[in-house]
Image (cartoon, rainbow, N blue to C red):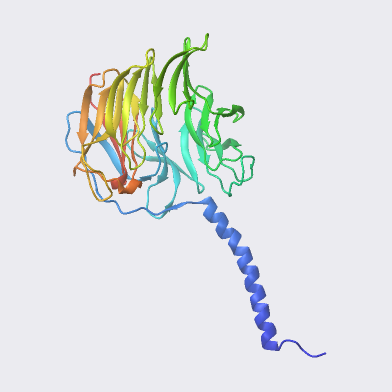
Amino acid sequence: MPQIFSRKGRLLLLAVFLLTIVVACISPMVEWFTYRTSIRQWKSASLSHNVPINSQFEKLWSLAAFIRCKSCLISTENNVYFSGSLENNSPEFLVSLDLLTGGIEWQQMLRKFQTLEGLNSKHIYISQSATQKIAGPTQLWGAAQIIAYDIESFEEVWRQQFAGSWGVSINRIVENMLVIDAGPGLYHVNTDTGQKIDGPQQQDLLSAREEIQYLRTYDAGPVLRSVNIESGEIVWDHDLPSFPQFVFEDELILIGNAVSGELGGAAALDGNTGETLWNQRRVISNIAVSNGVVYFIKLEEGVWGQDLALDAQLMAVDIRTGETLGTLHFEPSGIRSGSGHYEYLVTASDNIVLVYLGDGRQLIALRFLTDK
């Protein structure tokens, strides 16, 4: 029987066959590693900021860090938590720092597409974006999910997926309930078990007190609505900006709406009447509230672009009146938008304020010196 291939041809075919097997074995490993880790390559810091001597704010510590979202920085009584990285070309971690010293207490590597969303006294909540292409509203495989970890051991407690969702975020944590935005609608989920209480729905229960509940509804555009619980009657409506952030304090409602690289605002409403008590423009950070003080970063007037740095200051204002209680200008003056790639964040616990300046890749801890 004649030979179809020469000896050299057979060896070549064998080599191709073995190479195919090797590639087939390695590819899933590479894909698994890529899925498991998110290597963060920092853009060059355009500025390095210093805190000048100030009678209203005392610098406690600072460190280099990369933090990439509004929910990714949270402070508690003793700790600071963020998702991001402390070194360039490093995987992203969930990091716990000592609030007063900035010392690293622990780090847990995050998978790709995972982000810190919130925490309470028991759990840390992480969002996981979809790992597969979402083809329809009922697809569960690879859909986005929320994962709860024990805040001390970081062991997984539960996870909940949301069919048809590419991404999820926690809007708020209200007592024993997570309010989750999952794309097709809003869900209420038990904080301890992950069980869905209801959803998806288009009307969002934000808060309730005595005989009044506050809803975010989309009947006529995004609206904050006050409703009498007993009668169901609408007490007042307030038009909302895009991507609002809510903080409820006693009979006050604080609203922020800064988006990465864009100018937003900060405002306080009377919860009884819906009246605007005060309003601030050109806010570039989220808002943080502690001890009757509202903190945010405000930009001066002017055109803000990628290569244009405008002066900005950390503001501390009275929660009820909007009166300025303290300001801090960073040196050198001026921060950049980076075409929306830079985040500017604040969080506060008691009189300790954490500020993240994205253009400098800096996390700075300050003590607000006030008699309030």
Q: Is residue 293 visible?
A: yes
Choose between 311 and 13: the one closer to the eye. 311
In the picture, measured across the screen, residue 91 lies left or right of residue 333, that is right
Choose between 205 and 317: the one closer to the eye. 205
Name the residue: 35% across, 35% down: 258
In the picture, measured across the screen, residue 167 lies left or right of residue 66, that is right
In this rendering, the count of numbered labels is: 0
Choose between 270 and 39: the one closer to the eye. 270
Residue 78 rendering spot, x and y as whole percentages: 38, 30
Residue 10 rendering spot, x and y as whole percentages: 70, 83
Q: Residue furthest front?
A: 220
Q: Residue furthest right?
A: 1
Q: Which image quadrant: the C terminus?
A: top left
> Splitting the image into 4 quarters, where does residue 191 fall?
top right
Name the residue: 47% across, 10% down: 210
> Splitting the image into 4 quarters, where does residue 312 fall?
top left
Q: Is residue 319 visible?
A: no
In the picture, measured across the screen, residue 260 lies left or right of residue 11, that is left
Residue 139 rendering spot, x and y as whole percentages: 64, 43
Eyeballing the image, is 6 above or below 121? below
Name the residue: 46% across, 33% down: 118
Q: Which image quadrant: the N terminus?
A: bottom right
In the picture, measured across the screen, residue 354 lies left or right of residue 175, that is left
Name the residue: 29% across, 46% down: 359
> Splitting the image into 4 quarters, where does residue 281 fall?
top left
Eyeballing the image, is 37 above or below 270? below
Residue 56 rendering spot, x and y as whole percentages: 20, 28
Choose between 345 and 307: the one closer to the eye. 307
